[in-house]
Image (spheres, rainbow, N blue to C red):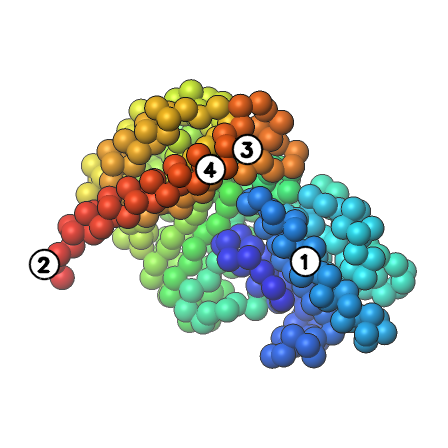
Amino acid sequence: MYASKLQMNLADSERMAGVLEAVGYECAEDPSQAEILIYNTCSIREKAEVKVYSALGKQAKRKRDRMGDLKIVVAGCVAQQEGQQLLRRVPEVDLVMGPQFANRLDQLLEQVDSQGTQVCATEHIEIAEDITVPRRDSNLTAWVNVIYGCNEKCTYCVVPFTRGQEQSRRLEDIKREMLALGEAGYKEVTLLGQNIDAYGRDLPGMAADGSGRRQHTFTDLLRCVHDVPGIERIRFATSHPRYFTDRLVRACAELPKLCEFFHIPFQSGDDDILRAMARGYTAARYTSIISNIRRYMPDASISGDVIVGFPGETEEQYLATERLVRQIGFDRVNTAAYSPRPNTPAADWEQQVADLIKADRLNRLNAVVMEVATERAQRFMGRT
């Protein structure tokens, strides 16, 4: 199985491996001996499709040489994005499946066998609760999905199209999975979601205290799973600034198993760019969230994501991003130059920033990020 290194993809890969092992398959040490090849793909970055097609070309030849004694599966976001087009371009592919079908891989492969045709599974479905056990890549740390999909409408992002609408798992199912992990000797769990702090807004019910909150929020989930025996550390990713409440911050400070590490993408330091991105917050709002975290947890580590060269971004707007990075004092920032993605509004806008300018801004920002992170790390000098 070939997979991108993003957390959601890694978790999906473990689930698919668990499904296959449950029906008798074993992971091949040598890919050339595999009966099933799975490409679990990501489409966040530009040219992701080109890389997938390039890899598939080599495997298609291998399949022809082996007279069809090989199944090729393309899963994940590129599969969801390309759909039937992928099957037409590479007829040797047996199955194209979106990430919502990860726990139904065995059923889809059976469909391939019974029908003797290519299968494309990219339609929206309600994600069923897993009954199989993922094949974990670690015996100490584990991913646990708590919410699938994304309801945001960020103008640059393909995720809502490739991963579908938000679907929160039931709180009791999440806790049951964590209890099993604790019993199996796992020590650390990372809770996963595209916008994990939006957990529960699609579940029924309102809080009984009259606050107007949903009955099940991410804060409630953290308090519920915190007492799971055996689990010593709990992390979570990825958070959206729009839903990062004071109530959540206080819970993280009060619950000793919660690691003081927060990954909260900010994407830009300029309010006009944030508005064009449809992010739903301002730079000042983002700054206030980080200030609140550090009020309760002064040594908390903060990481974020940022895009430079978004359509229409001026030099001054880029410099606002530099200023925000310095003001916040990030421990780590994942930086990227804007790349147009299919089925996103910003891809069709005029005022696309030239590649040379995007590359220059990315290099300059990376230097600032490294400088700030190095300075931030000095707080631990001389401490044990």
The residue identified by callout 4 is 356
- Residue 346 is left or right of residue 191, and the answer is right
Residue type highlighted by circle 1: Ser
Most foreground residue, 243 or 10? 10
Asked whether the residues under the numbered discs 3 and 2 touch, taking CB atoms below 8 Å apart as contact, a structural biologist would say no
Q: Nearer the viewer, mark 2 or mark 1?
A: 1
Per the image, label 4 sits on a secondary structure element best described as helix
- Residue 243 is left or right of residue 91, and the answer is left
Residue type highlighted by circle 2: Gly
Most foreground residue, 61 or 186? 61
Most foreground residue, 114 or 44? 44
Earlier sequence position, callout 3 versus callout 1 = 1
- Residue 324 is left or right of residue 186, and the answer is left
Which residue appears farthest toward the right when viewing the image? Answer: 115
Q: CA distance from mark 4 to mark 1?
A: 26 Å
The residue identified by callout 1 is 54
